[in-house]
Image (spheres, rainbow, N blue to C red):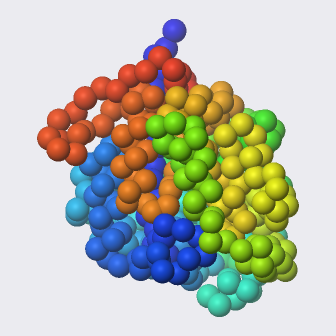
Amino acid sequence: MSPRSPLDVLWFIPSAGDNRYLSHPETNRAPTPALLREVAMAADRLGYYGVLIPTGSHCVDATITAASIAPFTERLKLLVAARPGLIAPAESVRQAAALDRLSGGRALLNIVTGGSPPALAGDGLFLDHTERYEQTEEFLSIWRRLALGEQVTHEGKHLSIKNGRLLYPFVAKPHPPIYFGGSSDIARDIAAEHVDVYLAWGEPPAQLKAVFDDVRARAAKRGRKIRFGVRLHIIVRETEAQAWDAAHEIIKYVSDEAIAEFQASMAKNSDSVGQARMSALHGGSRANLQISPNLWAGIGLVRTGAGTALVGDPETIAQRLQEYADIGVDTVVASGYPHLEEAYRVAELLFPKLNLRHPTAETGLEFDSVSPSFIPPPLRATAAS
């Protein structure tokens, strides 16, 4: 039997700012270069596989942020979010290749199509949901061909290019893996055709299994294999009771009025199928936030995107991650408030339960942390490029 490998656990760079409590401005931390660098350096020292650097008008620029932290890290992969329609595929592939060379082959690409028309309008993008995904499909088709060294001419509905080429190639071969998320039918087709890792927000494993099975089947019809990841928060403490206390602390300043206002705004302004699935988990109510064992939807009451957290002691969270591994997950993009302190807490408490290998902060010496409680997923097959 083939040996089994650990999960790839990535952390999150809070490039829109950070805080200790939601809806409590006095605990806000601005996304200064020093803060973002500090979080990245901690993740690198602690042995995280990589970091996700998000995109959006509320964030500092993802590519420039990645380039700024690359020289201060050694092993950390840089998963940089890019939004089709706001950057041409030729420029995007050049930026990715430059970051890949600068970092010694550590660049990863996360494609974000976007789900808030008012926010996208503020960036000059006025396409509807279907049109944005059509544009994403064209973007990825051009991007991948350029990345593979082709000379590309394409006349499309949304994007065009004539005799485009990438002159300075990637260190990673054939190019860095492409990550992508989207719950709609058209998004799943794009994932099946173009991407290496399909990312989903943290729904109960039984719900995600149906999504993953569908995407997997669509990829198989195209002769491709695809990997799967889950994006969620982790609230881990030495005991279950301490973890739940910490979860409730995060939202203790969130008022019912703030929840109602935020949920009404989401219903009005978002056309994201994934966001609708997140909102349906809690229904805008504090009443039933534990939506499956140890999976808590409290963050989604007043935050877009990933709105769920695994809450518990290290052994229990490792067991819950195994449930995701059982449905095909090999990548976890995690976060926690505040991100610097929680990066240490997750690594110190949870990594020993996940068979992860990481250096000590004090000595830099590596050691193996092995626990029989967690059986990682099988070694993944390489996705077709």
- Residue for point 65% across, 61% down: 299
Task: Indicate whether 41 appears above or below 192.
Answer: below
Viewer-proximal residue among 43 and 246 = 246
Total labels: the figure holds 0
- Farthest residue to the top: give it: 1
Name the residue nearer the viewer: 13 or 149: 13
Question: Is residue 8 or residue 144 the one in the foreground?
Answer: 8
Any part of residue 299 in sight: yes
Q: Looking at the image, can residue 307 be seen?
A: no
Q: Is residue 43 above or below residue 375?
A: below
Measuring from the top left, give residue 25's x and y in whole percent: 52, 81
Spot occupied by residue 255 in the image (x, y as percentages of width and height):
71, 74
Asked where in the image residue 161 lies, by quadrant, the reply is: bottom right
In this rendering, the answer to whether 81 lies above or below 6 is below
Q: Nearer the viewer, residue 9 or 374?
A: 374
Tell me the residue at 82%/65% (across/down).
284
Q: Residue furthest left?
A: 363
| Image spot of residue 324 (x, y percent) | 64, 34
The residue located at (55%, 45%) in the rendering is 243
- Where residue 287 sits, quadrant-wise, is bottom right
The location of residue 110, given as percent across then percent down, is 54, 60
On the rendered structure, is 289 left or right of 46?
right
Residue in the picture at 76% in, 52% down: 289
Task: Give the left or right position of residue 149, taking residue 296 as reference.
Answer: left
